[in-house]
Image (tube, grey):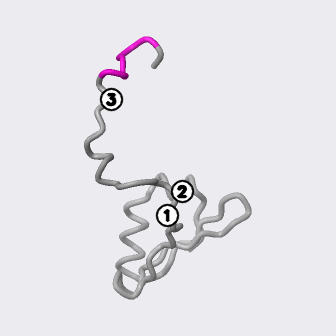
Amino acid sequence: MHVTPTELRADLYRLLDGVIAGGEPILVRRGGVTLRIAVAASAESSPPLPRPLRADLIVGDPEDLVHLDWSNAWKAGGDL
């Protein structure tokens, strides 16, 4: 089934229920790209989304972040 993003938004829950009940995927065309909404084989067999490994985000012990106190530096209002 092909739908536009507007049609998908207008009838999202009915369309998703149709995919679940019938197994037929929904194809959505947006910006020259076709997206597919389909039932996955199972949550366990679906590969996890790739997450970039960023070991350089925290320099030091992450536990130290738990105890940071910014209350003396933060002022409500003004520059928010």
User: Mark 1 highlights which residue?
Assistant: 55
Give how far apart the Cα atoms at labels 3 and 2 are.
47 Å
> Quick check: 45 above or below 33?
below
* Residue plotted at (35% across, 79% down): 21
* Residue plotted at (34% across, 54% down): 62
Dot 1: element = loop
Q: Is residue 28 left or right of residue 72?
A: right
User: How many dots with numbers?
Assistant: 3
> Quick check: 74 above or below 27?
above
- Look at the image and give the residue range highlighted in magenta: 72-78
Location of the C terminus (image quadrant): top left
The residue positioned farthest toward the right in the image shown: 32
Q: Main secondary structure of the magenta part?
A: loop
Residue 53: where, in percent of width, then height? 51, 68
Is 40 or 14 nearer to us in this picture? Answer: 40
The stretch drawn in magenta includes residue 40? no
Question: Where, by quadrant of the figure, is residue 70 drawn?
Answer: top left
Label 3 or label 2, whichever lies nearer to me, is 3
Give how far apart the Cα atoms at labels 2 and 1 are.
43 Å
On residue 70, the disc is: 3
Question: Where, by quadrant of the figure, is residue 73 drawn?
Answer: top left
* Residue plotted at (36% across, 77% down): 20
Instruction: Work out whether mark 3 precedes mark 2 in sequence or the reverse, and give the earlier one.
Output: 2
The amino acid sitting under disc 2 is Glu
Label 2 or label 1, whichever lies nearer to me, is 1
User: Mark 2 highlights which residue?
Assistant: 7
Location of the N terminus (image quadrant): bottom right
On residue 68, the disc is: none
Q: Are marks 2 and 1 in contact (CB under 8 Å)?
A: no
Q: Classify mark 3: residues with Cα within 10 Å, few (<14), some (14-19) or many (20+).
A: few
Instruction: Work out whether mark 1 precedes mark 3 in sequence or the reverse, and give the earlier one.
Output: 1
Dot 2: element = helix
